[in-house]
Image (cartoon, helix red, strand yellow):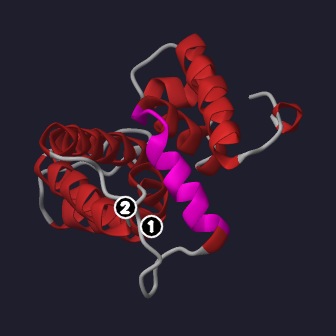
């Protein structure tokens, strides 16, 4: 989106357009990374607050949504690391409106996969980014992302009791 500006009406309209077009999708993507919709909403809201402050610069980027996603992932990772230092991570429950059955099993398994692998899995398999695009968003090299994807899929297969021959390539 190439709608930067001086924070006037055009800047607000451009920001609002990005927000309306991206917010729900980003929350859905981050929900998989964080395994919590509430945490995902907080991370995405924080990322949009940072976007608003930097709109004059970032609003002219080719893919503003990718910038917001990366910031939201970084926010979520930072919060997750702080929580891990303070206490054990709770397991998601099947509370009203929450995931149940296979979805809950997947979220529990994802919670046990290292955050870099989880982020790579979400960006590649959920968001649909290529390995190269995921590497760019994760500030890493494509080879590292391929390794994270391979290890993440292997971890999930083991945690979910899937046979090794069911795993696919990247």
Query: Looking at the image, which residue sits at the far bottom?
Result: 96
Residue 130 seen anywhere in this rendered image of the structure: no
Q: Is residue 137 left or right of residue 152?
A: left
Q: Which residues are magenta?
A: 102-115
Q: Is residue 162 left or right of residue 32?
A: right
Question: Which of the two residues, 67 or 110, is positioned nearer the viewer here?
Answer: 110
Q: Is residue 149 above or below residue 10?
A: above
Q: Position of residue 117 (x, y in %)?
A: 51, 31
Which residue appears at 34% of the width and 43% of the height?
73
Is label 1 in contact with label 2 (beta carbons under 8 Å)? yes
Determine whether the residue tagged by mark 1 lies in a helix, strand or loop: helix
Q: Is residue 97 left or right of residue 162?
A: left
Residue 18: mark in rendering: 2
Residue at image location 44% in from the left, 67% down from the top: 21
Q: Residue at x 57, y 75 (%)?
A: 100
Tell me where residue 10 sits by quadrant: bottom left
The image shows residue 1 at horizontal and vertical percentages of 41, 49
Disc number placed over residue 21 in the picture, else none: 1
Membership of 150 in magenta stretch: no
Vertical comparison of 93 with 62: above or below:
below
Which numbered circle lies on residue 39? Answer: none
At x 42% / y 71%, what residue is drawn? 93
Q: Tell me where residue 26 appears, x and y as whole percent.
A: 43, 58
Snapshot quadrant of residue 16: bottom left
Distance, label 1 to label 2, CA atoms, is 5 Å
Packing grade of label 2 (10 A; few <14, some 14-19, many >=20) is some
Residue 108 included in the magenta stretch of the image:
yes
Between residue 48 and residue 164, name the one nearer to us: 164
């Amino acid at each position: 989106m190439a709608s930067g500006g001086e924070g006037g009406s055009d800047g607000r309209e451009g920001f609002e357009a990005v927000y309306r077009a991206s917010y729900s999708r980003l929350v859905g993507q981050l929900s998989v990374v964080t395994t919590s919709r509430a945490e995902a909403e907080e991370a995405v809201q924080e990322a949009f607050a940072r976007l608003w402050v930097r709109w004059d610069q970032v609003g002219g980027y080719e893919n503003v949504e990718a910038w917001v996603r990366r910031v939201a992932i970084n926010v979520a990772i930072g919060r997750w690391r702080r929580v891990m230092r303070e206490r054990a991570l709770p397991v998601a429950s099947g509370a009203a409106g929450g995931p149940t059955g296979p979805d809950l099993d997947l979220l529990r398994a994802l919670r046990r996969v290292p955050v870099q692998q989880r982020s790579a899995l979400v960006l590649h398999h959920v968001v649909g980014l290529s390995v190269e695009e995921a590497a760019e968003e994760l500030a890493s090299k494509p080879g590292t992302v391929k390794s994270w994807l391979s290890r993440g899929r292997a971890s999930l297969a083991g945690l979910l009791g899937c046979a090794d021959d069911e795993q696919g390539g990247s």
